[in-house]
Image (cartoon, rainbow, N blue to C red):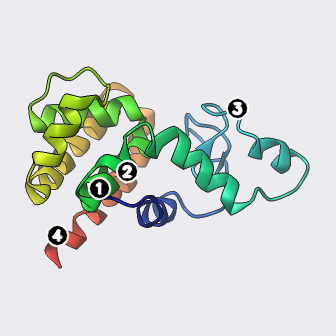
Amino acid sequence: MADFLPAFEKMILNEGGYRLTHISGDRGGQTYAGIARNAWAKWEGWSAIDRGETPSADLVRSFYREHFWSALQGDALVSAPVAQTLFDFAVNAGVRTAVILAQTVVGVTPDGNLGPKTLVALNAADAEKFILAYALAKIARYAQIVTKDRSQQKFLLGWVNRTLGSLKELAA
């Protein structure tokens, strides 16, 4: 079974660690440890930041466990690499988008909800084949974003590198 902490540690590196950033053109606005203020304005860590304090690592981990890992039923996924790539993409693109792409890859009707049929299909999938097909689907999704909104082009290389980084373990 997949374990949250290793998936979290890989994801937080992809998000730039425990840093406060505000990148021009980033739709999420101000971001701490990958948590975008525009999307998660009620996250309790923002009040600490507004007071000039640093939110605890436990607060960040619990946020990701609740809003992403649990939403993806990460603990019920058999393959840790499948869980990790699904989790990482959900953090980057949203749970619904991550699930829709995963459902498309495993041949389940894409509805954005990770229910029993999707869970069975993900657990039955060949992990390596899934991860490769999912990487292609993610890159196609990023290309769609940039085609629709050219202002997002500056993020494309980072998104593609993040996706390709998830394939390094397969090559090892």
Q: Specify the amino acid type for callout 4.
A: Leu
Within-10-Å neighbours for mark 1: few <14, some 14–19, many 20+: many
Query: On the rendered image, what quadrant is the N terminus found in?
Result: bottom left
Q: Residue furthest bottom?
A: 172
Q: Position of residue 89 (x, y in %)?
A: 36, 46
User: Secondary structure under badge 3?
Assistant: loop
Distance from Cα at disc 3 to Cα at disc 1? 27 Å
Drawn side of residue 124 relative to residue 99, left or right: left
In the rendered image, which residue does mark 2 sit on? 75
Residue at x-position 60% and y-position 31%: 39
Q: Specify the amino acid type for callout 2.
A: Asp
User: Is the Cβ of the residue at disc 3 closer than 8 Å to that at disc 1?
Assistant: no
Distance from Cα at disc 3 to Cα at disc 2? 27 Å
In the rendered image, which residue does mark 3 sit on? 41
In the rendered image, which residue does mark 1 sit on? 163
Ranked by sequence position, the earlier of labels 3 and 2 is 3
Q: Which mark is residue 170?
A: 4
Q: Position of residue 49 (x, y in %)?
A: 82, 50
Q: Nearer the viewer, mark 2 or mark 4?
A: 2
Ranked by sequence position, the earlier of labels 3 and 4 is 3
Ranked by sequence position, the earlier of labels 3 and 1 is 3
Within-10-Å neighbours for mark 2: few <14, some 14–19, many 20+: some
Drawn side of residue 131 relative to residue 89, left or right: left
